[in-house]
Image (cartoon, rainbow, N blue to C red):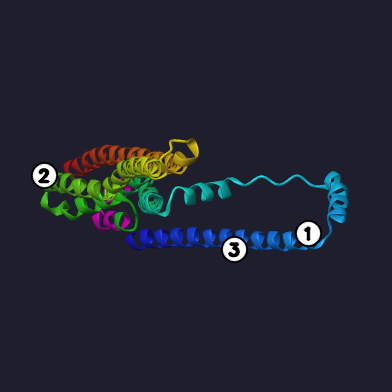
């Protein structure tokens, strides 16, 4: 799973860098086209230019609006590479851990009732080894807990219960592995945004002091940086918060299923011992 986190992080950073390169190339191509158009227009006399412009005006097609992706990249660049880059890395690493947890928890979910029936059939036949094989060949924390209990089967019911309780705590810790990092990134993203806000306001006051004027044009750049960093930081926190709540609910569901199934398993072992 750690390799999966690293792969997702590297792939996301490479994709973002590639999209920025393509965007820069498009901008350069558009700029060169504009320069060529301007030079050719200057070469013409004013009478011919007016005639051409008048004829072209009715047939001119409306300019296409920017896509959401283009607007997002433009605002990201305007926010400054410093704090915006850190906020982006926060999103990338947070999503990498969140996706890894979602995949892990999804693979840990099984039909525990079906597993319990299969173990019950094996124990009913007195074949403890077959019950162990069923648990070993089944993925998920419930099967691992059953296997741990069956390994202590010959030591008595009390040892089976103790091993299930102890190993259940270990499995719960594995399910919650990495969740604290997601909560850290959720708290870190808006704080970085607010820090960018403060720096942007300081920049605005520096511009006022340098220009000796308080006109909107002087302070616009600093205020824009301040607002953009805050917005992106809050967006990152909202995205990661959704993943965090889903992961927590998934863990709670798995732990509840583990507890219920473990109680049923202990009752099953106790009935078998009575026989």
Q: Main secondary structure of the magenta part?
A: helix
Report helix, strand or loop for mark 2.
helix
Place residue 7 in its image quadrant.
bottom left
Q: Earlier in the sequence, mark 2 or mark 1?
A: 1
Relative height, residue 32 to residue 229 (above, below): below
Q: Taking the image as drawn, is residue 11 in sight?
A: yes
Disc with the residue nearer the chain's start (1 vs 3): 3
- What residue did someone put label 1 on? 41
Query: x, y percentage for residue 192?
Result: 33, 45
**Which residues fall within the magenta stretch?**
120-134
- Label 3, on which residue? 25
Q: Which residue is mark 2?
A: 158
**Picture quarter with the C terminus:** top left
The image shows residue 252, relative to residue 124, as above or below, that is: above
Q: Quadrant of the N terminus?
A: bottom left
- Separation of marks 2 and 3 at Cα, in angstroms: 70 Å
Q: Which mark is residue 221?
A: none
Q: Rounded to the nearest whole Å, what is the CA distance between mark 1 and mark 3?
A: 24 Å
Residue 113 visible to the viewer: no
Helix, strand or loop at disc 1? helix
């Amino acid at each position: 799973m750690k390799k999966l986190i690293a792969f997702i992080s590297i792939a996301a950073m490479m994709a973002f860098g590639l999209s920025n390169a393509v965007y820069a190339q498009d901008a350069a191509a558009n700029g060169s086209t504009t320069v060529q158009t301007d030079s050719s227009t200057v070469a013409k006399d004013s009478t011919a230019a007016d005639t051409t412009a008048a004829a072209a005006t009715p047939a001119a097609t409306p300019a296409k609006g920017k896509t959401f992706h283009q607007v997002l990249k433009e605002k990201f660049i305007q926010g400054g590479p410093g704090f915006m880059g850190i906020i982006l890395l926060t999103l990338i690493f947070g999503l990498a851990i969140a996706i890894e947890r979602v995949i892990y928890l999804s693979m840990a979910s099984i039909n525990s009732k079906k597993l319990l029936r299969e173990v019950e059939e094996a124990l009913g036949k007195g074949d403890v080894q077959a019950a162990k094989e069923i648990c070993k060949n089944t993925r998920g924390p419930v099967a691992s807990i059953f296997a741990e209990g069956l390994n202590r089967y010959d030591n008595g019911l009390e040892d089976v219960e103790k091993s299930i309780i102890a190993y259940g705590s270990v499995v719960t810790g594995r399910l919650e592995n990495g969740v604290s990092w997601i909560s850290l990134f959720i708290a870190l993203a808006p704080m970085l945004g607010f820090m960018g806000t403060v720096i942007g306001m300081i920049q605005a006051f520096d511009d006022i002091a340098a220009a000796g004027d308080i006109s909107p044009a002087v302070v616009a750049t600093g205020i824009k940086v301040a607002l953009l960093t805050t917005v992106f930081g809050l967006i990152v926190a909202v995205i990661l918060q959704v993943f965090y709540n889903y992961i927590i609910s998934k863990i709670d569901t798995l732990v509840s299923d583990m507890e219920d199934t473990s109680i049923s398993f202990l009752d099953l072992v106790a009935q078998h011992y009575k026989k």
